[in-house]
Amino acid sequence: MTEELAHHYRQIILELGENPDREGLRDTPRRAAKAMQFLTRGYAQTLEEIVNGAVFESETDEMVLVKDIELYSMCEHHLLPFIGKCHIAYLPSGRVLGLSKFARIVEMFARRMQIQENLTRQIAEAVQQVTQARGVAVVVEARHLCMMMRGVEKQNSSMTSSVMLGAFRNNLTTRQEFLTLVSGR
């Protein structure tokens, strides 16, 4: 697969009017192919592999919040990165998820081509599926290079998306507690 992708990158370089055989670009098609495979490796992962049985019985029933999980993803519209952070909270109902698994879930979905809104929903639904929590809340804050490097070229713009499931959707007090904890106020 790497060689086929490299061939296509070589063609793109040619179509842009560059010489893919010049010294600085000679190995670029292969490097670009490997980079794209790395940036989209989430397609080769499954939730079951990522979680790897790290769900544990617990009497904890108060909110659990994991903040500032960095993420790097690819905008499906322009194949340019968006970079940000994710905050995840859930209300356990007899089961808790190993801490590192939150970052692994974020990473798996972020390493796919998509829009931020879908990424946010995928993370929330995955945490809900694995934990069977009474509620899950996810907020993703990101800066999109497709908006910063091209188009309107707005350097200080960012996007925030959220998904609230269960008690976070149905209970205003629970939702507000989560949003207060995330904002640090």
Image: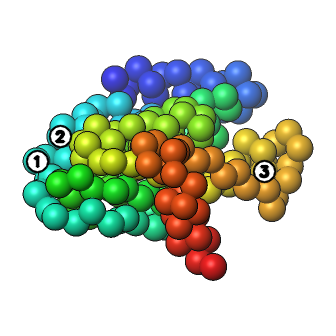
> Which residue type carries mark 1?
Gly
Question: Which secondary structure, mark 3?
Answer: helix
Of residues 66 and 178, the one nearer the viewer is 178
Q: Residue 49 shows which numbered tag? A: 2
Point out the residue furthest to the right here: 152
Q: Which residue is mark 3?
A: 148
* Number of the front mark, 1 or 3: 1
Q: Earlier in the sequence, mark 1 or mark 3?
A: 1
Of residues 87 and 1, the one nearer the viewer is 87
> Which residue type carries mark 3?
Met
Q: Residue at x 62, y 47 (%)?
A: 161
Q: CA distance from mark 1 to mark 2?
A: 8 Å
Q: Which residue is mark 1?
A: 53
Quadrant holding the N terminus: top left
Camera sees residue 28: no
Of residues 159 and 179, the one nearer the viewer is 179
Question: Which secondary structure, mark 2?
Answer: helix
Please state the horizontal and vertical placement of residue 155, each as a whole percent of the image. Answer: 81, 58
Query: Is residue 82 shown above or below 48?
Result: below
Label 2: how many Cα within 10 Å (few below 14, some 14–19, many 20+)? few
Q: Residue at x 59, y 38 (%)?
A: 117
Looking at the image, residue 3 sits to the left or right of residue 173; the answer is left
Label 1: how many Cα within 10 Å (few below 14, some 14–19, many 20+)? few
Please state the horizontal and vertical placement of residue 99, each as a whole percent of the image. Answer: 26, 64
* Number of the front mark, 2 or 3: 2
Please state the horizontal and vertical placement of residue 64, each as a whole percent of the image. Answer: 35, 65
Residue 79, quarter of picture: top right
Looking at the image, residue 2 sits to the left or right of residue 141; the answer is left
Q: CA distance from mark 2 to mark 3?
A: 35 Å
Camera sees residue 134: yes
Q: Residue 109 shows which numbered tag? A: none
Of residues 38 and 64, the one nearer the viewer is 64
